[in-house]
Amino acid sequence: MHRMSISVHDKQHFLTQSTFFLDTFESDYVEYFSALCVHYDKTIVQNDAQQMAMSIYKNFRKCDFTISDLREDVLLKMKQDGVMIGFLISRSLFYMLEKYIVFCQEQHLDSNIQLLIGCVSRFMNVLECKVTSKCLESIARFDLDPDTSLTASNSIIQIFQAIKDEGKTVQFLNLYQGVPITCDAKIVTIEGEHISFQTDRLQEIAMKLDGQAFVIKNDYFERHLKADILYSNFLTNTVVLHNFIYLLNMPALKREFVRVHPDIVAKVYLHHEGERETSGRLYDLSINGLGVLSTENNGISLGAKVMVGFDLSTLKIHSLERIEVEAEVINIIENKGTYRYCMRIFPEKEMHDKIVMYIKQREKEIIQNLEDELKEYVV
């Protein structure tokens, strides 16, 4: 397969010949990218998305192939939240290609589309090296062959074909109410970009309820994958997936302990030194951390040391268990007037044992809920 390489001189030529387009398109690019970014990650504010778009566009317009002055804080936040940075950038630059073709047609100008594609391809490779410290050519490469997609889907399908030919399996992971559901799956058939997998029923229902499937990286894939569900057959334990894309990371794999969602609205009170009490409800809970949703912020900031108190109960343990732990605020996610406080907790032994007992019981309840959901689909 032939791929065009582009030199600094070639890029300089394109930039010189296309100055008017690049000047007039900048605001359109910023608006498009920021809208795309905010749509895929609700924790990214519009201003940060716009600043990031301008940073990307500024670096793209440099005549050399270096990257500087990127908003690393936004990139890091996007990676932590699991947003597909490769997809966002590749889709926005593909939008540039579309607009450039229309611009040339309307202005009756000779198109340098091949040079622009070369510039985009080279820029994305350099950008990936900057963002991930690792150049992964399998992601969002732009091929000049007319029968080749402008995404990584072709190479992904080819890798799945190699896995099938060698009789290997892939591992799925979905979260259901905070509990990880995993299994090894066999590739049954590959038809175009549709791949059928044989999996177990619990994984299949977890996928269906999640609305997506996630494949853990392995010896074949250097990154985790996400896919859409085209069809599920609970009688044969098969699921057909398509629209495979790479992910930068999979936050669920970073969890050292199971993090469950409480089955009750547990009222939480954050006692912040020197400030008045902040109340909220328990969002999730693990042995070493918890999340609290609240409409209040009474001076709580990142790194704040707080005392957290709340009551727990389970279906099996009807009496309320009072939990009081010291905590440190490690992240605050603000969205539409609400705050989600993510905290690391430091429970003493008695509190630790109570939390462990609750999590184990809650995990059993969640798995039972999943099995009950499965009964709706299995005759």
Image (cartoon, helix red, strand yellow):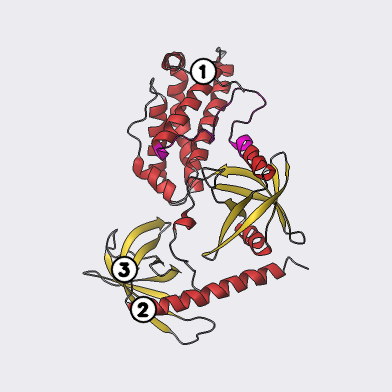
Is 154 in the magenta? yes
Disc number for residue 115: 1
Amino acid under disc 1? Leu
**Is 267 drawn above or below residue 235 in the view shown?**
below
Of the numbered discs 1 and 2, the one sitting upstream in the chain is 1
Main secondary structure type of the part rendered in magenta: loop
Residue 236, picture quadrant:
bottom right
Crowd rating for badge 3 (residues with CA inside 10 Å; few <14, some 14–19, many 20+): many
40 left or right of 197 in image: left
Residue extent of the magenta highlight: 131-156
Residue at 26% across, 66% down: 305
Residue 234, picture quadrant:
bottom right
- The Cα–Cα distance between marks 3 and 2, rounded to whole angstroms, is 13 Å
Q: Which SS class for mark 3?
A: strand
Of the numbered discs 3 and 2, the one sitting upstream in the chain is 3
234 left or right of 361 in image: right
Residue at 39% across, 61% down: 339
Q: Nearer the viewer, mark 1 or mark 2?
A: 2
Residue carrying label 3: 327
Amino acid under disc 2? Met
Q: Which SS class for mark 1?
A: helix
> Residue 281 versus residue 64: which sits nearer the camera?
64
Q: Are marks 1 and 2 in contact (CB under 8 Å)?
A: no
Any part of residue 310 in sight: no
Amino acid under disc 3? Ala
80 left or right of 246 in image: left
**Is 143 drawn above or below residue 53 in the view shown?**
above
Residue 268, how many percent across, how many down?
38, 74
- The Cα–Cα distance between marks 1 and 3, rounded to whole angstroms, is 55 Å
Residue carrying label 2: 351
Residue 187, how many percent across, how many down?
69, 49
Residue at 46% across, 30% down: 125
